[in-house]
Image (cartoon, rainbow, N blue to C red):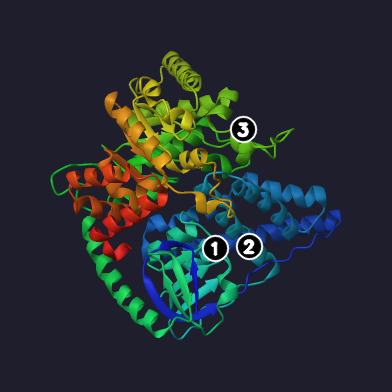
Amino acid sequence: MEIRKGIGVSPGVVIATAVVLDAEDLMVPRRHVDAAQAVVEVGRLSDAITRATLDLTKLRDEVSAAHGKEIGGIFDVHLGLLRDKTLVNQIVAEVNTQQTTAEYAVSVVMRRYKTKFTHMSDRYMQERVKDMDDIEKRLLRALIGQKHQDLTHLDRPVVVIAHDLLPSQTAALDRSHVVGFATDVGGRTSHTAIVARAMGIPAVVGLGNVTAEASGGDTVIIDGTRGYVIVNPDADQLTEHREAGKKFVDFERRLQDIATQPAVTRDGYAVTLQANIEFPTDIAPALAHGASGIGLYRTEFLYLSSPVEPTEADHYAAYAEALARLGSGKPLVIRTLDLGADKYTQEKAQNPERNPFLGDRSIRMCLHDIPMFKRQLRAIMRVSVLGDVRIMFPMICTLMELRQARMILNDVMEELDEEGVPFRRDIPIGMMVEVPSVAIMPDVFAKEVSFFSIGTNDLIQYTLAVDRTNERVAGLFCPGHPAVLKLVRDVIRAAARNGIGVSICGEMAGDPLYTLLLLGLGLPVFSMNGPDVPEVKKIIRSTTIEHARTVARRVMSFDSERQVMHFLREETRKILPEAF
């Protein structure tokens, strides 16, 4: 018996026989071709793109029909990249200038793209590398003919154990026979995870080396709710998890009814639950899960999906589409560019930074490239007349940075005024609170903005000096650390004192373990990944504000994260036993 803890990305409990997939490493050696053969290679590339496009279009249509257009829309992103002339031209140029095969050129160019994502500090954006990997392998298979192990002839329920699964592999799983999957790598916000949740397949990722522990034919329990896998369980574990699986099905049925209900406590205290998105296509699923608006629209993918910087028109089109999908009366908080030297400019820099996580990133980078910053701000201001748009500056560390950003925004407004372009003059302007320098003196910053959004992911990292993506120290990353909680409480209180809005848009907001605490601390707006909304709403609707305040007072008296986590787990279990 082997128990492995990972990241539960799609809830549910299943027990079945394991099918273990070997990792697919498509070997692409560099091979020189002459000028005449290069023309042939470009033709092969064109044929491969055509075949890959046809296959992806079919997959998108099948997924859309089975699980909705929003989930199928994930593959629209893949199709868009395959049709991107800039990307294709780069591969063609690699073939012609380096006189190499089409498959080697695909490998080289696509890996450049993936490097951009891999080096990002934002975990959500890091996980976009899987989409690029999916496209690369699809093209390589079209060029050299290698295929994944076949899962189309299954005759019994199985769980798939793999090093990793790409979004397209996940979408193509035979749901009538594949009842769950577990992988060595992966994260909560990858498109693989999103597809798994949409298909209702319990899944655990980030298990480290589960492929070495499980063999084909082993009995495996996958608990996607609590995030662990048991290989060859004993009789007691089998009985316990069969019962847990039945309870989860009943729990999910009840949660579906919660989505349309207001986020109001039993004694009438109302809060707002919003969603974090990256693409306009993320909006419909978020609303379906019960979100009342978008509290964080990440705009980085506009820069990372193309080797050329997006134009003002590109920005405008994306934001206008998001507003159209959102509908009237719902807020759209657009975060300005949150890229950094660590994830976008290092490969371009003449002198790469030694510690880019503390370097020229986010708002600093924007203030050093004002034309780029203005292009985005102009698009946001132009689209502000189409709906309830709000603008948010990330990674503010000093009052001077905030004032400089606002000054540039004022310049943009003056330019648009002179051009006769309409915009909303009183657009709400907010800022992220994600570094201790701001969280320690929030009253000063509150006088300069309309709202705060606490980015707990980075705030925890900077407060505790822990890189959560570093497996050696990731265990020290804890939202329940008393120092972190004190900063969060102080920011919420400062916002209330100064009459401005405040939300949390980090993962802490969507974790039901912290809902009672944040509610009791007076947080009025929670912004999270869409699928997390019903569970958080269930807790809010099952308690009273007085009980939440009592929980918060008790938690703030503790001096260790161990005490905090134990107490919160016990209190939450009383309300939501199915989740713990």
Image coordinates for residue 448, horizontal then vertical, percent = 38, 20
- Residue 538 in which image quadrant: bottom left
Q: Earlier in the sequence, mark 2 or mark 1?
A: 2
What number of labels is visible? 3
The residue at 29%/75% (across/down) is 246
What kind of element bears circle 2?
A: helix
| Pointer 2 with pointer 1, Cβ within 8 A | yes
- The residue lying toward the viewer, choosing from 200 and 376, is 200
- The residue lying toward the viewer, choosing from 196 and 446, is 446
What kind of element bears circle 3?
A: loop
The residue at 22%/63% (across/down) is 254
Residue type, mark 1 in image: Leu
> Residues under labels 3 and 1: Cα distance?
32 Å
The residue labelled by disc 1 is 166
Residue 243 appears left or right of 73: left
Locate the C terminus and report the quarter of the image it occupies: bottom left
The residue at 58%/60% (across/down) is 134
Image coordinates for residue 498, horizontal then vertical, percent = 29, 23
- The residue lying toward the viewer, choosing from 333 and 302, is 333
Q: Answer above or below: position of 224 versus 571.
A: below
